[in-house]
Structures are given as C-alpha cells and as structure tokens.
Image: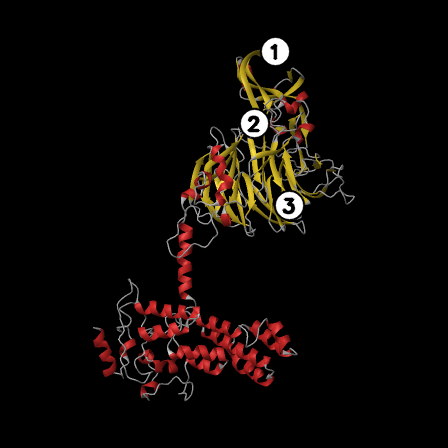
Amino acid sequence: MGLAYNVYLNSKSIYGCKTCKTHLADHDEIISRLRLQNFRGQHGKAYLFNSVVNIQQGEAGERNMTTGRHVVRDIFCRQCKEVVGWKYDRAYESTEKYKEGKYILEQELLCKVA
Amino acid sequence: MRQDHNHEHRTRPSTNGSSANGSSPHTNGSSKSSGETNGYHTNGHSNGEGAVREHDDSPFFGHDREEVTRILLQSLSDLGYRNAAKQLSGESGYELEIPSVASFREAVLDGRWDEAEALLFGAETAEADGGVLLGNGHTRSRRKSRASFGSQNGYARQGLPLAEGADTTQMKFSLRQQKYLEMLDNRELNSALKVLRNELTPLKRDIGRLHALSSLMMCHSSDDLRMQAEWDGPEGDSRTLVLSEISKSISPSVMIPEHRLAMLLTAVQEEQILNCRYHNTTAQPTLYTDHDCPAEDFPLQTLTELRHHSDEVWYVEFSHDGSMLATAGKDGLVCIYDTRTYALRHEIREHDRNLNSASSAEGSNSKGVCYVVFSPDDQYLISCAQNNEFVVISVRDGRRVAHADHFDYPVTTAAWLPDSQTFVIGTQGSRRPLGLYSLRSGAGTSSASNVVKNNEIHSWRDPPWDATQGSNPNSFRITDCCVSPDGERLVATTIDNRILSFDLRTREKIGEWVMHDRLTSINFGVDGTQLLLNMNEGQVFTLNAETGEFIMRYEGAQQKEFVIRSCFGGAGENFILSGSEDSKVFIWRRQTGALVAELEAHAGGTVNAVAWHPTEHGVFASAGDDRRVRIWASASAIRPPSAEAGASRTSLGYYASR
C-alpha cells in the first residue's frame, strides 16, 4: 500500500536481512546474554532483541518449544518477504514471561551491515 | 453654490484663500493636509482675460472630480494625445500641474540645474526670471508664511511641497550629481570641480559615491566617462531618470506619480487575478469586465484511465515537451505513453534481469521502480529501482544506454543536468548516497553496443569515503533530489529530515536546513527561486531556494506513512498539485495558498504521484495504489467540440467517445 522507504538504523553494529541487507536490528538491542541461555532456532543460533525494524508479522500460533509452550508469530523482512525469525506474543511459563513482546532473529538469516 | 465661490475668487483675489487651509471648495471636503493644495484652477489670472470658468465640483461616482480629471490629463499626455489634454484642461478648468511644477519639469529636462533646484526648494531672494511670477506684483509674494503656500506665486518662493519623509539632501545630491556629470561630459572640468567641491561635498552624503564621482574626473573622454559611470549622457534617459527619482519625493497631489492610471488599473487586475480561483492562463485579462475564469476550463474531470500496471503505480511524469508520459510502479514495469492518443509506446522491464529468486517473490517490494525522469532533451529516461540499481534507456528505441548496480540499497531518485548527459542519483545507501554520473564513458564515446556502467564521476558523502579505513561511519541517505533549471544547484532531502544544498560547479555543499519531520518530495519551480516540499504529516509548502525561508503552506493533504509527491503546474505555474493518503488529489493556488479543488482520484489507496502537462495547461495526471493512472482534463475539453468551439478543442474531444 503506497511506497514507503525502509527504516535505517544509526549504529556501529547493525544486523540486516541476509538476502537484501535491509536493516533489521541494532546490536545494542540484544537482551543481555547473561540472563539467558543461547537461543536456538531452526537454523541454529539466534538472538533475542528488544526491538526490530522493517519487519512484517505473520499469523500467531501456539508452539511447543524446549522452554515450554508459547504463542509466537513468524516475522518477515519487509523488503524481500523472507522469514528472519519470530516474535513471542505470549509465554505460558512464568520464567519465560520476559520474552513477551520481544523478537528472535536467527543468526543464519542475518548479515552484519556496516 | 458653485457660482458663489467663483465670485469669491474675483472679489477677494488677495486672500488667495481659495486653495489653502482645508476650507477650500476645491478640495470638496476631502482630507488634505493644510499647506498643500492640489486645487489649482486657472483663476483667470493666467490667461489674462479675467473670464470666469465654471467648474463642476460634483463628485464623479464617489470620487473627487479634480483627482479624476487630473489623472485623466496625465494619462492623455502619457498616451500622446496632447491636444485632447489641452482641450480637457480647458473644458474642465483643471490643470495637470501648476506652472511651477511644469517649470521644474522643464528645467530638469533642459538641464537648467540651478533653476530646477530653486524651484524645488524655494529661492532665498526673488527671482526676476524663471517666468513663474505672475503679473500681479503682490507684495504678498515676499512673505514666507505658510499661509501663502496656496498661491501659485508662493510656490516660487517656498519650493514645491514635498512628500512625507522626503530626503531633501538626497534630492539635492541627485540634481547636483547630474549637473556634475553633464559638465564632465562637456569637458568643463573646472566648473565640474567647483560643483564637486562646493555643492556635492558639503552635503556630506554617500562618501563612497563621492569618491567614485571624483575618480570620474580622470576619464579621458566623454565616452569613457559614460561607460565608467554607466550613464547615457544628457541627451539620453538620464535627465528623465533624475526627474522620476525626484518626483517620487514631491507631494503626490502636486506632482502626480507617473502613469498613475496605469498603476491603478494594474493593481485592480492583479487583485482580480489573485482572487480568480481557476486562473489557468498567463494571458492578460481584458479590462472591460471583471476577470473570473470559469470552472469548465479547469481540469477537474477524468479524461481517461491507463491500466497497464499490475500493481501500485508509484510515479508519473510528463516529458519536457509534453509529448510523452512515463509511469512506473511496484510491478517493476515502466510504461511510456504518447500523450496525443495515450497509446502505449514502450513497455520496459529493465529491472527484471537483475533479480534473484528471493526478490521476485510474490508481493515483494524488491523490483519496484520508484522514480523515472526524462532528460531535458527527452532522449533518455532514468529508471530508479528498489533492487539497488538504476538504468538509463534511450526513449526512441527502448535500448539500455547506461546502468549502475554498485549500490547496496535502493536507488530512490534522479535528476538531470541541463546538458542531458550528466545526472545526479540519490540512494538510500550510506556508501554512495548521492552521486554525479555521466552518459559519456571514460573513452569519450559510447557506441551503440556499449552500455556505460557504474560511471560515477563524483560522489557526495559526509564524511567522505576513506578507502583505507576498515569501516567508515554512516553518511546521510537520500529520499529525493532536484536540480535547479539553470543547472547551478542541487538540492536533496535526506532520511534524517535535512535539506542539503550543493553548488554543481564547485560541487561544494552550500547549505543545510533541518526540518522537523520526514521529507518525501522536493521540486524546483521553473524559475529556480522556489522549492516545493512534501513533509509528514500532511504538510506541503514552498521555501525560498536561496535562504530556505518558508514562503507558503498548502493545507489539506494527508501524509503519515507513505511517500507522497507534489509538483508545480498550470499556466505560469499558478498551481500546486499533490497526492494524498486519503485517495484524493489536491490542487491549490500557488500564490495565495487557496484550495482550488479536492478530487477523488484513486479509490481505496494513496495517490502516490502527480504530474502536470508542461505545455497543455489544461491536463494533468495522477497515479495511485489502485494500479491506475488517471489523466484529468477540463470539462470544456472533454465535451465533443461544438460548431463554434473551433479546431483547438478537437485534439481531446474524441476521447469522450472512448
């Protein structure tokens, strides 16, 4: 709907979509690793981000993950429509509540943008 | 009533009270400052006959009869009808100018400077010559009291009444400067020197000019003098110019400002034009009727819709000669139409070649073309795409002539320089945000089979790219740019809400203005003095191109999330046209900001871009998310031509049946 330019982040270290290099997240937005184990997605290592840009959200669905049941939705790069990770809508375990509203980006689907 | 006053004139000649002190019958009770008069009648003195002239004092449709008559006298003289002027003067009893003003005028035009100055400011002692004294021999004429201001004789003594805030020193300087220059021209160097020393210098005004004038003494010949002083000599316009300048400082009721009637007429016409809502013409309207353009002649109706795009249309533009229309959209397609018939001339899919599998996915943004622009000679078209490249194609045969894909982010905008060989490209990348490219390859020629590739001849970046560094900090990213019509300046808008201005000859940045919200469109006006901008949220406005000062705001359009574009258009660029997120096209009067029309254009989506036909002022185009391009024209153009409409309408008329 209309032409809209992508958002560009201003930071020393930015992650972008591997396919089209669209900016997705700032490295500083990663939620501190001390608190949590490494995340693993379908493609291996993943990071939990506070906020991401230039993504479109898919339909929410329940999924059973190693950490328990969650309601998640896939997120896609706005530009090339490739999946880049998912967003936690809801976590059933109280220890996992901190993930709600946050985003996972899979390292395999990202690239570093200067 | 009138008769009585005339009697007063005759029976009390010495009071001269006729025209002074505000109680004059001639002033008809209108407010004039005392001490000034404009009511001079030929009291019968000047023609020596003693005959009484009856003059009608009744107002002329609410206006002072004397003012109207004197303005008419001036106009008749300006038009060259001197006999008619004399006749009118005789018949009405009014004179255009009192004799002393007329004498002053003649003195200046004849170069009798001392006399001119005496007439203007008043002489200290009685003058025997000058021809201004009338034969009454009034001793009154020696008095300098204000009461005698009203008399014609009195002017010779008191000088002419001056306007408010008149600078007498400046006026003297003007007169004496002309005197000096004429003496120099005549090679009377000694007299000129005397004037310089005794008349110009004591005024203590404009020392710089005095120095310049003294240096003119060194000129060898009068031709040299004229060239250096930029002065055309006594027989040229210089005396008239001096007169014009001084007359501005003389009270307007004594010496009516030049071409007063023409000025009044122009003022009324300009007012009518500004208030004319649909004024889409540069022709001078007639004086016979109040001017108001009819709505039938303004493009408010749809002429036709172009439906070749299979997805949102993002950009539309006419060629500079108006013969072609280019459209571009999200489907990666660029269409070129012929504007006489709106038949499709070329369908160009240049950007499909460089897509990888991911970016050709359904619904992806990746292959969209977001900007197209014709070169000034309409030979080439640049197409800027979301897949990080631009292509230049030749319009005649659709062949690719240049290509650049060394970008890491979408190419958003382009602008040609007047030579139709070099152009500016703006992108969202930080490595190469703004660059100057050329169609001429390094070898000097581009043969038919060569496509000039990645031929960037200059790059603007802040900070400049340092290849020795491992990583360079981010630079500005460009959303839109435009080049001034004379090719001197480049102005670009960035993603962080700044407007950057560059000199194209020196390639230096000459200005930067910070705006407070996202900028999506920038365009130069045809004379290069104004910039038209679209900014979130729903702001369309013009800025002064030199200073960045705000000129006019145009309200009503909506813009929050998407790129909406606007343009100048119409005859004399009288209109501003913009798209909007509420599916409407907005048209405003450029000079006043008044909303002319709000048209439902592309239902269900945003109106992304608009363009006005450069030569046929009754046509414009709009492009929207509904995949259509709509061509608008006036009701009178769309209607089938009637018998008296004439041949000019037939070109559009046949569309009505399509």
Q: Which residue is mark 3?
A: B377
Q: Quadrant of residue B398?
A: top right
Q: Which-is-in-front pick, marks 2 and 3?
A: 3
Mark 3 on the same chain as mark 1:
no
Q: Which residue is mark 2?
A: B311
Label 1, secondary structure: give it: loop
Residue B444: image location, x then y, percent: 77, 45
Q: Are marks 3 and 1 in contact (CB under 8 Å)?
A: no
Which residue type carries mark 3?
Asp
Q: Nearer the viewer, residue B217 or B281?
A: B281
Position of B432 relative to B245 (above/below): above
Question: What separation in Å lies between label 2 and label 3 (alpha carbons)?
Answer: 30 Å
Residue B241: image location, x then y, percent: 50, 71
Q: Which-is-in-front pick, marks 1 and 2?
A: 2
Label 2, secondary structure: give it: loop
Q: Is residue B164 visible?
A: no
Name the quadrant of the N terminus of chain B.
Answer: bottom left
